[in-house]
Image (cartoon, rainbow, N blue to C red):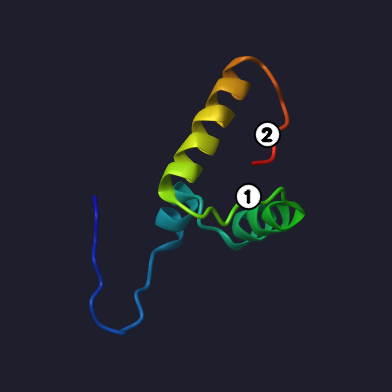
């Protein structure tokens, strides 16, 4: 299901729905902390450069390499 909220009225999402969607605060904080550790890639100069990087990552992960390579 997709919902589009077009005004600035706050939207209240029931706790059961937040849990099921993985939107509880602890999960969000944990994901943000993990993201802060990196690695970060980009910005890319072109979309083609980003696609090339992503394809290389897919090949590396399928080959069993754990750590993504830098662009």
**In which quadrant of the rendered image does the C terminus lie?**
top right
Specify which label sits upstream in the sequence, 1 or 2.
1
Vertically, is 70 above or below 35? Answer: above
Vertically, is 18 above or below 47? Answer: below
Vertically, is 13 above or below 43? Answer: below
> Residue at position x 68%, y 34% from top?
68
- In this view, the residue in front, 24 or 43, is 43
Vertically, is 59 above or below 40? Answer: above
- In this view, the residue in front, 2 or 68, is 68
* In the displayed structure image, the side of residue 10 where residue 25 appears, left or right: right
> Residue at position x 54%, y 37% from top?
53
> Residue at position x 43%, y 55% from top?
16
x, y (%) of residue 66? 72, 26
Q: Are marks 1 and 2 in contact (CB under 8 Å)?
A: yes
Query: Residue 29 is drawn in which quadrant?
Result: bottom right
Say few, some or many: other residues with alpha carbon within 10 Å of mark 1 (under 14 / 14 to 19 / 20 or more): few
- In this view, the residue in front, 10 or 46, is 46
Mark 1 and mark 2: Cα distance apart in space: 10 Å
Q: Which mark is residue 68?
A: 2
| Callout 1 secondary element | loop
Q: Label 1 belongs to which residue?
A: 41
x, y (%) of residue 56? 56, 28
* In the displayed structure image, the side of residue 55 where residue 37 appears, left or right: right
Query: Residue 10 is drawn in which quadrant?
Result: bottom left
Residue sitting at the far bottom: 8
| Callout 2 secondary element | loop
* In the displayed structure image, the side of residue 71 where residue 46 appears, left or right: left
């Amino acid at each position: 299901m997709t919902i589009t909220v077009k005004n600035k009225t706050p939207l209240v999402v029931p706790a059961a729905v937040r849990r099921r969607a993985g939107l509880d605060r602890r999960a969000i904080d944990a994901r943000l902390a993990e993201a802060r550790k990196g690695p970060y890639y980009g910005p890319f100069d072109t979309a083609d450069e980003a696609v090339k990087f992503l394809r290389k990552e897919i090949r590396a992960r399928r080959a069993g390499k754990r750590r993504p390579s830098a662009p």
